Image: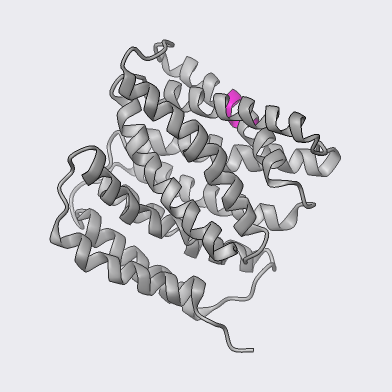
Amino acid sequence: MTLAAFLATSVLAGGNAVGVRFSNRELDPLWGAAVRFGAAALLLLALVAVRRLEFPRGRALAGSVLFGVLNFGVPFALGYYALVRIHAGLGQTILSLVPLATLLLAVAQRLERFRLMAAVGTLFAAAGVAVISRAPPQGDVPVLSFLALLGSVLSFAQATVLVRRLPRVHAVTMNAVGMTAAAVLLFAGSLAAGDTWRLPDRAATWWALVYLVVGGSVLTFVLYLFVVHRWDASRASYVFVVVPVVTLVLSAWLDDEPLTRWLLIGTPLILLGVYLGALRRRPD
């Protein structure tokens, strides 16, 4: 079940970039992100009420808020800023280092032991992502944009590690609280950035938002927390290296993005990395 949830999370998250691409054609980025997570938070809070799930208190509540800030608010705000100046391929390659960052943070916080195969797997996977996205190895990269994307990587990684340190909270409830906190930050960021607050006019944008709310937020992150609660944090974070493959395939299907030989070359490297880092049976 955990492996099935991992694969489902990868597929659903892979559709997020396509949905965001459609959304950004009509809506300002931070405003679109705020609407997405605000609507997802309302949906999850309604689900909490209908199922009468226990609402967290004390340390669990504070941890859920912090998880939302680290997993949704900070990385999405920094990522949107970084990708204005950084090539998307390079951005995907840097984000594929999340498993390595997660491993190192988990080791530093004494939640996991350092595993050489996990580090090697991340490097194979990152190389595969670089190949399929054809990230340019040279050229001027703005320092602030690079640091923003690196901050996004560390934020995603720490959010995953944090879940393992907190009192157990139901995945639906933790995401409801977390997305509410993130939505507040994103609405504030959108206001500060001077975004135009408007609803979309195009049907394609509405369909994209529906997917981003239901599939790309509610289902994706509930399943992701299901995986994190059952696997080590570093293993669960390998979702980040599978996502680019799914994104390219869905982009070819829905957005007429051409598939190239680079997908065939890079995908085996990614799969090898995921096997070594996340799926390979460990010696007793």
Residue lying at 67% horizontally and 34% vertically, measured from the top left: 176
Image quadrant in which you'd find residue 181: top right
Point out the residue furthest to the right here: 58
| Residue 36 visible to an observer of this rendering | yes
Q: Position of residue 232 (x, y in %)?
A: 62, 66
**Residue at the (73%, 43%) spot, across then down:** 63
Which quadrant would the C terminus be assigned to in this image? bottom right
Work out which residue is located at the far bottom of the displayed protein and give it.
Answer: 284
Residue under the point 44% across and 33% down: 211
Residues in magenta?
A: 181-185
Query: How far across and how far down the image is residue 228, in percent?
Result: 62, 58
At 55% across and 42% down in the image, what residue appears?
Answer: 219
> Can residue 144 be seen in the rendering of this structure?
no
Q: Is residue 183 magenta?
A: yes
Indicate whether 165 appears above or below 107: above
> Which of the pair 37/218 is nearer the observer?
218
Q: In which quadrant of the rendered image does the N terminus lie?
A: bottom right
Report the predominant secondary structure element of the magenta stretch. Answer: helix
Determine if the magenta segment contains residue 259: no
Residue 132, placed above or below residue 206: below
